[in-house]
Image (tube, grey):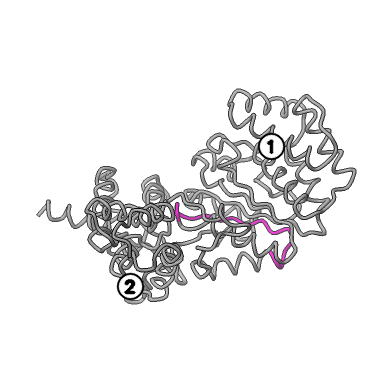
Amino acid sequence: MSPDPRAKFRALTRVFDPIYRPYLDADDGPGSSYVPEAHEHYRAELEAALDLNDNAKLLLAGQPGCGKTTLLLSIAHRLRREGRLVAFVDLEAQTAVQDLGSLEMYLAAKAEIVAEVKQAGISLSEKTTEMLRSALERLLGSPVAPDLDALGAALRRLLSTVRESKLLRDELRRQIKESGFEPIDMLAGLLDDLEEHRPVVLLDGLDKLPPVQARDAFLGDEKKPMVEAPGAAILTIPISLIYEPTFNVLSERYNNAGSAVLPAVRLYDLNPHTNTRRRSEQGVSIMRRIVEARVEPIDPRIVMPEAVERAIVGSGGNIRELARLLQSSVVKAHVRRGTFIEEQDVAAAIADQRESFRRAYDPRFLPVLEKVRREFRLEGQGDVTKQLLYGLWVIEYRNGIAWYSLPDPVEQLLRQMENWAG
């Protein structure tokens, strides 16, 4: 190995960046570092629902970093290989997702569908083409040519304009409302025209909606997102929505509302009869392969096995948290002028995370955390429950039932607090 590992450390910090998107380097799909076994059973259920029902409307919830986007990209890749038309819509990249309206959401979906239609060499009917052209001309106030390139460019231009300016977003929404035009109508016409290609729309980014806005969008009196559109769809949603008292009503509109949560990779198996957990070799092996897939192209020996194991335990089974710990560990190794990532580096990164939890600690958390620690249960629908899940104070697992565990940094914090109290 080179005496100066800086270049390899630089490469590691890239692939372990928590916002690293390996699919950007791939022609299609989630990228070479994807490990399909990470959510094999959950993915199989979604794919079965899409295979059996061309109009399935599905939800995908989960804690930040659990792998929702990567899972959707994997599904998109497989469906395209089967000949279906799939539009993966990255709402976070294309819209002001913190102030997202149905108008912008459906515009983004239409833009991706038009791009996929062009990529697949499919033709739209004259009726659909004219519908899109005339609607875009009204919205833009300028002529639009009746071809896929021009339609796609017009949609992107409109999206870019409203993304950058709240004033323009509000004005466009006002115009649409006064005109009586329903934003979903144009999307419905487009999908209806593509029925023979069994279209699927994957809306990623709705999980970034602020809790109040998400509640209004899915549980309010408004029409539910994508429900009235032809074709199939999967929508990511915030984990907080699952804990709303009226969430179960969505089972009337979305086929999998009762099983919408994508859990963390399970590092432990729970025995509900003895209320004890034991290490899951299968889950640990999956997390190990996730690390190997990113490290091997750089240097398969640069992260010591003990460091990998320590990071896996520290992550709690959350894929993004695993990446964050390892990226921080690379920095620790570089500071001490190491040539490998060692267990001591990961331990220092976990200690940093423990201190981060300490700074964010609220005394209201303690009884809830202690119950999770003791009984592996998380109960209630209040703000504390949602904060602990969203902030990764608590990790959700499933083996037959939903149960919960504390990640290592939170366990360390509780032990530290007990020592201080003693």
Viewport quadrant of the C terminus: bottom left
Does the image show residue 419? yes
Q: Nearer the viewer, residue 174 or 291?
A: 291
The numbered dot on residue 156 is 1
The range drawn in magenta is: 50-65
Residue found 66% across the figure and 56% down from its top: 57
Image side of residue 145 versus residue 335, left or right: right
Instruction: Say what secondary structure mark 2 lies in.
Output: strand
Image side of residue 249 versus residue 285, left or right: right
Image spot of residue 408 (x, y percent): 28, 60
Magenta includes 284? no
Q: Earlier in the sequence, mark 2 or mark 1?
A: 1
The numbered dot on residue 293 is none
How packed mark 1 is, by other alpha carbons closer than 10 Å (few <14, some 14-19, many 20 or more), is some
Give the vertical position of 236 relative to 134 (above or below): below
Image spot of residue 75 (x, y percent): 62, 62
The numbered dot on residue 277 is 2
Image spot of residue 366 (x, y percent): 26, 51
